[in-house]
Image (cartoon, rainbow, N blue to C red):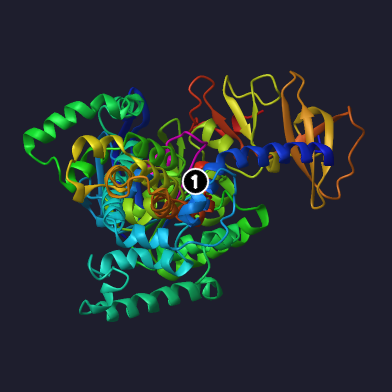
C-alpha cells in the first residue's frame, strides 16, 4: 500500500500564532484516517491544507507522491464535506449534487440556462450528469428529495446531500470536517455506519476530522491524535488505547476517562504517574489498592464507582452489574492486572517503557 | 405589554394622518391630471373631477417629448444599475471573503467615500468630462455613479454574514472566484440587491442636479429635466398635461416599489440565510 496523501513536516502560522508545528501525517490508499483532537488543536487546519483551501507556511503536501502545494482544491480532485454542510441554499438538491460535475463537463457557454442547449455536446453532457446525480441520490436514499431546496431538509438529509455532492465526482480523496457534530446522538450513530459503508463502497481514502474519540475509534483504522498543533500519536485505535505514548493521549482515548494516580495514591512506581482505566479496575477483596467509596452510579450492565484515595485523589472504577455496593463512605479494595497499568513521566508526561510491571506494588 | 384596543386605534390614526399628509400632493396631482381644464382653476376645492378627462394624458404622450424622456430615464437608470452591480458585488465579495494586503484600509476608504456627498465631487467630474469631451452623452449621465460606496457597503454587510464554508465548498467543487461571485454569492444576495436596486433607481430617476450640469441637449433629458422643459416652453400654464406627465413619470417607481416591496424589506432587515 502506498500513501495517497502525506503532510511532510508542515508548519502553518497565522501572523505570530503557530497553528501547526512540524506536522507529518500519512494517509494510506483506501484507509480511513481520523484526525482527533480538542478544538483549536490544528486538526481542521491540517484538513484544509490537504484540501488545498489553505497553504502551509513551510513543509510539503504530497498527493499520490507528487507535490501539490501549487494546486487548488479542484485540481487536486479532493472532495470535502463540511461541518455546516455548506449546501447552496438557492439551488435544489439535484443542482447541489450536480454542481461539481457541471463545472467539469460543461463549458462556460454550455452552462447558460437557455443558450446552453445549443452548444454541441451539452445536452448529452447534461444527461450523463443527471444520471450520475440520480445514482448518487439513490445510494443515499435521496431520490424523493431531488427537487427540494436545502432549507426544507432535516439535518440528516442535509448531511446526506453534502455526502452526495462529494460522492458524485469520484474524487481521489474524501475529506470530512466534523460532519456529524450538528446531528443529534441517535442520528449520529446511524450516519456513522452510513459513512463507514460509503467508505467500503468507494474504496477511497477518507480523512475524518472529529473531536469525538468514540467516532474515531468506531470508524477509523488509523487515528492521528493532535494536541497543541502537533501530532501527539498516530496509530490504530488499539495501539492508542493500549499503548498511549503520552498522558494527554491516554486522557483523550477511551470511553471512560482514564484515572491518573500520583505516588502515594496506592500504586507506587518510583515517581511515575500511574494511568489506569476505570474498566481495568474492579472491586476485589483480595485487591492491593484500597480507597474510600464516595458514590456509585448503576448503569445496568455495570456500576460506576467514584472513589477517593488516601491522599485525596479522585478516581473511578467499574464494577459488574451484579456487584453489591457497600455503604457509601466505607473503604473497599480494588484489583487490577499489572499489564494494564500505564506509566507516565511525572514531568514530561511521556510514556515510560521498559519498566517491569512486576515492580508495581 | 399587549396593545389594547384603544392604543391601537390611537397609533393607527396617527399613521393614517401621517400617510394622508404625505399622500396628499400625489392625490392632488392625480386629481389634476384627470380634471378638465376649467375645473383646475376653479375657486372651490374639489378633490374628485366631475368627469375623467383623458385628453391631458393624450396631450402629454403625443404632443410632447415625454416618451423620449422616459426612454432616456430608463437607459440611464438601468445603465447605472447594471454597472453598479457588476462592480460592487465582486468588490464586496473580495472585501469579505478574500484576504489581501490593506483590506481594512480599502474598506475604510469605502466608508469615507460613503460620507462624501456627490455635490463635492460634481465639479471636478464635470471638468474632467469636459476635457475628455463626453459631456452631453449618455455616458456623462451614467459614469459618475458606477463606483458606488453605498452598494459596496450594502453587499459587504450581506456577504459578511454568509458562512465561509459555503465558499470553500464552491472552491472544492471547482468554481473560480468569479464563478463563486455570480453563481453563489449574488443569487444569495438577491434581497440585498433588490433593496439596492430600488435605492439606486429611485435616486437616479429623480435626480435633477447632475443631468442639469452634465447635459444641455434636450434629446438627452431625463424625466425630471424633461418636466422642467415642459413647464417653461411647451405648455405654459397648461397644468393638466403637466400633472399627467408628472404622473406618468412617477408611476414606474411606485409600481416598481410595490412589486419589490417584500424583497426590499427583507433586504434591509438583512434576510438571514441558514445553510
Where A15 falls versus B212 (above or below)? Answer: above
Q: Which quadrant: the N terminus of chain A?
A: bottom left
Count of numbered circles on the image: 1
Q: Quadrant of residue A307?
A: top right
Q: Quadrant of residue A331?
A: top right
Q: Quadrant of residue A337?
A: top right
Residue sitting at x 52%, y 42%: B25
Could you tell me residue B17's position as x and y percent?
66, 38
Q: Residues within 10 Å of mark 1 (few under 14, many from 20)?
A: few
Could you tell me residue A57's position as x and y percent?
26, 33
Residue sitting at x 59%, y 25%: A273
Q: Is residue B271 visible?
A: no
Q: Is residue B250 left or right of residue B104?
A: right
Q: Which is more toward the observer, A345 or B88?
A: B88
Q: Chain of mark 1?
A: B
- Is residue A39 covered in magenta? yes
Q: Is residue B69 left or right of residue B26?
A: left
Q: Which is more toward the observer, B2 or A75?
A: B2
Span colored in magenta: A33-46
Where A148 falls versus B200 (above or below)? Answer: below
Where A327 falls versus A149 (above or below)? Answer: above
Residue sitting at x 80%, y 33%: A333
Q: Pointer 1: what residue?
A: B41
Where B170 falls versus A167 (above or below)? Answer: above
Q: Which is more toward the observer, A73 or B157?
A: B157
Could you tell me residue A286's position as x and y percent?
80, 36
Could you tell me residue A359's position as x and y percent?
60, 29
Amino acid at each position: 500500500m502506498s500513501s495517497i496523501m502525506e503532510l511532510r513536516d508542515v508548519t502553518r502560522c497565522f501572523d505570530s500564532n503557530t497553528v501547526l508545528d512540524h506536522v507529518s501525517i500519512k494517509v494510506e490508499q483506501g484507509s480511513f484516517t481520523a484526525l482527533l483532537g480538542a478544538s483549536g488543536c490544528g486538526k481542521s487546519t491540517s484538513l484544509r491544507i490537504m484540501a488545498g483551501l489553505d497553504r502551509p507556511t513551510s513543509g510539503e503536501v504530497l498527493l499520490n507522491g507528487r507535490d501539490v502545494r501549487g494546486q487548488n482544491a479542484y485540481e487536486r480532485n479532493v472532495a470535502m464535506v463540511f461541518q455546516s454542510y455548506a449546501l447552496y441554499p438557492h439551488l435544489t438538491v439535484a443542482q447541489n449534487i450536480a454542481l461539481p460535475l457541471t463545472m467539469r463537463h460543461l463549458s462556460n457557454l454550455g452552462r447558460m440556462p437557455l443558450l446552453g442547449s445549443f452548444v454541441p455536446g451539452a445536452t448529452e453532457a447534461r444527461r450523463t450528469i443527471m444520471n450520475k446525480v440520480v445514482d448518487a441520490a439513490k445510494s443515499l436514499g435521496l431520490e424523493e428529495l431531488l427537487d427540494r431546496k436545502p432549507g426544507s431538509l432535516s439535518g440528516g438529509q442535509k448531511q446526506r446531500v453534502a455526502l452526495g455532492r462529494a460522492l458524485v465526482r469520484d474524487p481521489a480523496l474524501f475529506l470530512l470536517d466534523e460532519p456529524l457534530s450538528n446531528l443529534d446522538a441517535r442520528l449520529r450513530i446511524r450516519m456513522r455506519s452510513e459513512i463507514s459503508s460509503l467508505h467500503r463502497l468507494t474504496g477511497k481514502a477518507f480523512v475524518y476530522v472529529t473531536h469525538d474519540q468514540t467516532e474515531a475509534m468506531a470508524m477509523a483504522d488509523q487515528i492521528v491524535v493532535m494536541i497543541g498543533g502537533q501530532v501527539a500519536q498516530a496509530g490504530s485505535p488499539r495501539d492508542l488505547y493500549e499503548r498511549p505514548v503520552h498522558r494527554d493521549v491516554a486522557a483523550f482515548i477511551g470511553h471512560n476517562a482514564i484515572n491518573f494516580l500520583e505516588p502515594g495514591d496506592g500504586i507506587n512506581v518510583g515517581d511515575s504517574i500511574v494511568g489506569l482505566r476505570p474498566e481495568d479496575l474492579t472491586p476485589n477483596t483480595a485487591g492491593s489498592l484500597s480507597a474510600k467509596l464516595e458514590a456509585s452510579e448503576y448503569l445496568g450492565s455495570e456500576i460506576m464507582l467514584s472513589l477517593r484515595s488516601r491522599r485525596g485523589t479522585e478516581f473511578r472504577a467499574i464494577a459488574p452489574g451484579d456487584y453489591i455496593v457497600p455503604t457509601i463512605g466505607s473503604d473497599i479494595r480494588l484489583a487490577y492486572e499489572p499489564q494494564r497499568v500505564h506509566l507516565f513521566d511525572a514531568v514530561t508526561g511521556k510514556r515510560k517503557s521498559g519498566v517491569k510491571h512486576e515492580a508495581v506494588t | 405589554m399587549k396593545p389594547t384596543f384603544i392604543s391601537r386605534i390611537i397609533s393607527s390614526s396617527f399613521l393614517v394622518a401621517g400617510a394622508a399628509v404625505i399622500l396628499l400632493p400625489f392625490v392632488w396631482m392625480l386629481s389634476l391630471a384627470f380634471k378638465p381644464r376649467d375645473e383646475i382653476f376653479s375657486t372651490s376645492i374639489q378633490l374628485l373631477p366631475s368627469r375623467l378627462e383623458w385628453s391631458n394624458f393624450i396631450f402629454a404622450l403625443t404632443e410632447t417629448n415625454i416618451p423620449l424622456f422616459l426612454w432616456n430615464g430608463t437607459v440611464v437608470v438601468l445603465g447605472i444599475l447594471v454597472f453598479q452591480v457588476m462592480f460592487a458585488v465582486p468588490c464586496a465579495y473580495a472585501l469579505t471573503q478574500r484576504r489581501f494586503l490593506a483590506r481594512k484600509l480599502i474598506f475604510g476608504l469605502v466608508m469615507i467615500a460613503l460620507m462624501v456627498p456627490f455635490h463635492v465631487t460634481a465639479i471636478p467630474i464635470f471638468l474632467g468630462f469636459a476635457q475628455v469631451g463626453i459631456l452631453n452623452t449618455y455616458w456623462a449621465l451614467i459614469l459618475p455613479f458606477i463606483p458606488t460606496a453605498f452598494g459596496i457597503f450594502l453587499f459587504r454587510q450581506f456577504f459578511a454574514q454568509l458562512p465561509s464554508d459555503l465558499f470553500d465548498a464552491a472552491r472544492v467543487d471547482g468554481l473560480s472566484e468569479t464563478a463563486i461571485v455570480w453563481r453563489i454569492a449574488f443569487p444569495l444576495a438577491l434581497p440585498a440587491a433588490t433593496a439596492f436596486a430600488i435605492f439606486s433607481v429611485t435616486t437616479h430617476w429623480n435626480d435633477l442636479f447632475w443631468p442639469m450640469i452634465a447635459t444641455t441637449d434636450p434629446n438627452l433629458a431625463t424625466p425630471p429635466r424633461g418636466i422642467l422643459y415642459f413647464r417653461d416652453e411647451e405648455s405654459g400654464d397648461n397644468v393638466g398635461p403637466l400633472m399627467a406627465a408628472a404622473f406618468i413619470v412617477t408611476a414606474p417607481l411606485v409600481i416598481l416599489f410595490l412589486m419589490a416591496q417584500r424583497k426590499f424589506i427583507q433586504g434591509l432587515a438583512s434576510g438571514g440565510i441558514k445553510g
